[in-house]
Image: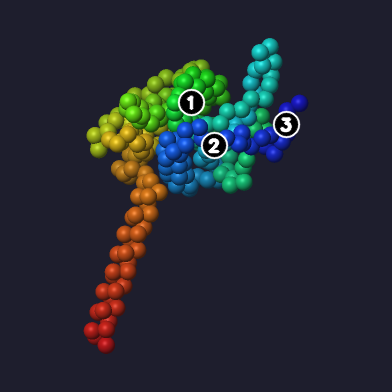
Amino acid sequence: MLARDEHSLPETDGLPLPDGRVQQGPLGYSRDALRRRLRHLNDRVAVEGDMFIYYIGRDPNDGPKIASVSPDLFVVFGVPDRPDRKSYVLWNEPRADIRFVLEIASPSTRRRDHTQKRLVYASLGVAEYFLYDPPGPHRKARLLGARLTGFDFEEMATQRLPNGCVGVRSQTIGLVAYVASGGELRWFDPVAGVDLRTYDEAATQLDLANARIAELEAQIGLSGSKHS
């Protein structure tokens, strides 16, 4: 018998990301940037990360069994963004449409990301699968964007961006993912013509804005004192 809801199933395996900071940087940036980008749709779109998706798989005898997968980041359409959510139990949420998945590859997950998980996401009907492989000591960063065609993913065409970098556009979320000159993963908004900011970039911009406001207030105060 299937468990009734998300509260009846484990919400975590208790393990940290296997390769720590290698994955945390691009994952944190992507999650925060996409949530800001899609926040006006949070009544029907959710951006999630490192959370179990439960589905009906097959056991060695081809019988049904409860299976799970935990993408680094995924975008779900058809459900509201719930801060208290613990997992997705697909047989209880027929409207949950997982259209986009991003995996951050690492030495310990690379093979599984390219093979096993790719097959699982195709079987779940995920429309787009993006895979970012961070740079290593003897390896350049790589980015793959693929779209579901039939029962498997087909690599998507790349495009040249105004900054000279080459990226892959997601039709699902309307953004272009690319590898910057330093090897880091970035998201470009083709409508606004700008990159989605990192947390540090947003904080720096806020500090500059606050400093400018303080400067203008000081000038206004000085001007007022001269005329008093």
Colour theme: rainbow
Q: Residues within 10 Å of mark 2 (few under 14, many from 20)?
A: few
Q: Which image quarter holds the C terminus?
A: bottom left
Tell me whether circle 2 and circle 1 mark residues in contact (CB < 8 Å): no
The disc labelled 2 sits on which kind of residue? Pro
Q: Residues within 10 Å of mark 1 (few under 14, many from 20)?
A: some
Which of these two is toward me, 147 or 136? 136
Q: Name the residue under label 3.
A: 3
Q: State the SS at label 1.
A: loop
Residue 117's tag is: none
Which of these two is toward me, 60 or 193? 60
For residue 167, what is the image quadrant?
top left
Mark nearest the camera among 3 and 1 is: 1
Q: How crowded is mark 3: few (under 14 residues within 10 Å), some or many (20 or more)?
A: few
The residue lying at 25 percent from left, 38 percent from top is: 163
Q: Name the residue under label 2.
A: 16
> Sequence-wise, which precedes: disc 2 or disc 3?
3
Disc 3 to disc 1, C-alpha distance: 29 Å
Q: Mark 1 points at which residue?
A: 109
Above-or-below relation of 145 to 44: above
The residue lying at 44 percent from left, 26 percent from top is: 107
- The location of residue 101, given as percent across then percent down, is 48, 31
Residue that extends furthest to the front in the rendered view of this protein: 137
Q: Which image quarter holds the N terminus?
A: top right
Disc 2 to disc 3, C-alpha distance: 26 Å
- The location of residue 63, given as percent across then percent down, is 69, 15
Q: State the SS at label 3.
A: loop
Which of these two is toward me, 130 or 125? 130
